[in-house]
Image (cartoon, rainbow, N blue to C red):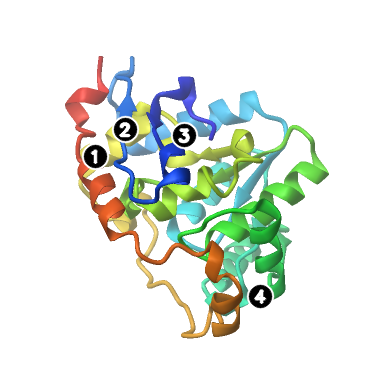
Amino acid sequence: MILKNNWFRTNIEDLHKDVYAKIKLEYDAGDFIPTNFTDSTKKIALEIQTKYDHIYVAYSGGMDSEYVVRLFHKNNIKFTPVCAWPEATRQIQYAYSVCKELNLNPIIIKLNDDDILEIIEEMNIKVSTLINQPPICAICKLAKKLDSDAIVVTGENFFDDAFAPREMHVYNDLITKYRNMILPFFLYNQHIVYEILVAKQSKAQLYNIPFRKKIRTKDYISENLKKKAKKYYIIDRYESLEDIRISANKFLPSKLLK
């Protein structure tokens, strides 16, 4: 994944061989002056604008990706929102509503069970969730087809167990083919992570976006898909999850500063 100066690293490759391998996290302190969340996110957005010509934002309708969309729009950064989550999540309706409000024309990729299974089989991957990873892969595939130098900005961050298997696999065993074009906005550098940690606020407070619950129907992943994808689907990863949470707790604000 695209991180500034590759500032943190994991031994995630070990999980390809053993899903219960102990996870290790290494990270470098950053040379920055603490400011605030709003200023640091704006700075990152403008830096991304200067570095990349073709920017796509993976927009699920969640609060994280909405913040990125609104931030880029506010700062007149040229980008294309792409919505590729299964319609059954219903959360995607939030994305459609915001795009209409901001007069944005999103690319919409509708995924059914066969599409998701095809992506998983094509990549020959092990997944920890069937709902997040295939859509990201579909977005990367499309973006690369449209622009060979495209990047895909995502909203993963420390709020959502950033080092849980679900999040790490989005960038690693799922998208080995595309990892060099994925930029996780809220993990981009030490500065933004620092500001998130010291703010100690909820997403709604930090993003200044009204709180709303995720909306998913009970059958957003069909039993048929679960059955067909069984050999790719890692269901029991609690031990690994706990290892990663413990490791993630080593990220302390004081250690992110040089």
Q: Amino acid at mark 3?
A: Lys
Residue at 73% in and 58% down: 105
- Residue 231, horizontal then vertical, whole percent: 55, 66
Could you classify mark 3 by the number of other residues whose Cα lies within 10 Å: few (under 14), some (14-19), or many (20 or more)? Answer: some
- Residue 73, horizontal then vertical, whole percent: 59, 46
Reading the image, the residue beneath label 4 is 113
Label 2 close to label 3 by CB (< 8 Å): no
Q: How many marks?
A: 4
Q: Which mark is residue 25?
A: 2
Q: Is residue 109 visible?
A: yes
Foreground: 78 or 137? 137
Label 2 close to label 1 by CB (< 8 Å): yes
* Residue 189 picture quarter: top left
Q: Which mark is residue 137?
A: none
Please give left or right for residue 55 compared with residue 250 in the image: right
Foreground: 231 or 258? 231
Foreground: 22 or 200? 22
The mark closer to the camera, 3 or 1, is 1
Mark toward the start of the polypeptide (2 vs 1)? 2
Residue at 33% in and 50% down: 20
Q: Amino acid at mark 4?
A: Asp
The CA span between labels 4 and 3 is: 38 Å
The CA span between labels 2 and 1 is: 6 Å
Mark toward the start of the polypeptide (1 vs 4)? 4
